[in-house]
Image (cartoon, rainbow, N blue to C red):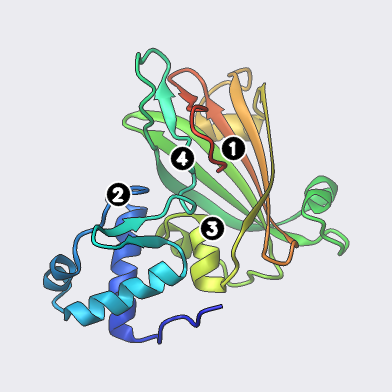
Amino acid sequence: MPKPPTRNPLYAQVADYVMQQIAAGNYRPHQAIPTEWQLAKKLEVSQGTVRKGLDELVFKQILYRQQGVGTFVADQYGDWGLFGLVGMFEKESHSVFPKSEVLSVVAVHAGNEISDLLHLRAANPLVWKVLVLWRHQINTVALDEVFLPYERLQDLNRRQLITRLSIESLLLKEYEVRLNHLSCMASVGGLNAELASVLKVSAEEPVLYMQIKKTDANGEMMMLKRRYILTRHYQLNLSANSIV
């Protein structure tokens, strides 16, 4: 396996700037980022420094290069993969990608169900519970309820999450944990009172429910994500074949 590029504060400045632009939705999956010359001028550093900073993100597979073409944003760290959403009454299936708002990051006791799903062995263990709200234009479109093992991520906090493209990219960049997809189940149902209150809809509101489980590189359970997609304005674009 290749060694990561040498860490340097100036290189980190470049990498962090690009990550912030990705997180803000300014650089989308498979979109070319500005050239090294443009970034060097913007950040007032040399092109060599920019190249080293981008090398870090290429190494972590957040970016990829095409020889003679440019440097592009990889898709696998976006929270919607290639799915995106399409308007209920749109004639074309062009995907839109909602923007996220991290509502809370709290440590809670897992309970039996979450413990079983995350394969946690301790009695009544702590887990991180992360709530992420998704909006497109003026519409609230989805809510994520994410559970992560507390013991492996004890210093996790909301500030970390709001500066990253996704939980996956945060785990990779900050904790060197690469997530692998394990399973995804989907169904149509309603909401419990707590989640309905967060989404500001009734508990009878129909939602597309997705439960996604991911492991680390060693096959250990690392993340349980429950995504609730409101179906009044948008539907999931299943013409793509990527998993969130």
Give the label on residue 25, or none. Answer: none
Q: Position of residue 35 (x, y in %)?
A: 19, 63
- The residue depicted at 32 percent of the width and 71 percent of the height is 54
Quarter the C terminus occupies: top right
- The residue that mark 2 highlights is 31
Label 3 – label 2 distance at C-alpha? 19 Å
Residue with the mark numbered 3:
168
* Secondary structure of residue under mark 4: loop
Q: State how far apart marks 4 and 3 are (Cα).
A: 15 Å
From this view, report whether residue 64 is shown above or below residue 45.
Answer: above
Q: Amino acid at mark 2?
A: Gln
Q: Is 101 placed above or below 122 here?
A: above
The residue pinned by badge 4 equals 82
Residue drawn at x 31%, y 31% as measured from the top left: 137
Residue that carries the numbered disc 1 in the rendered image: 227
Q: Amino acid at mark 4?
A: Leu
Q: CA distance from mark 1 to mark 2?
A: 26 Å
Mark 3 or 2: in front is 2
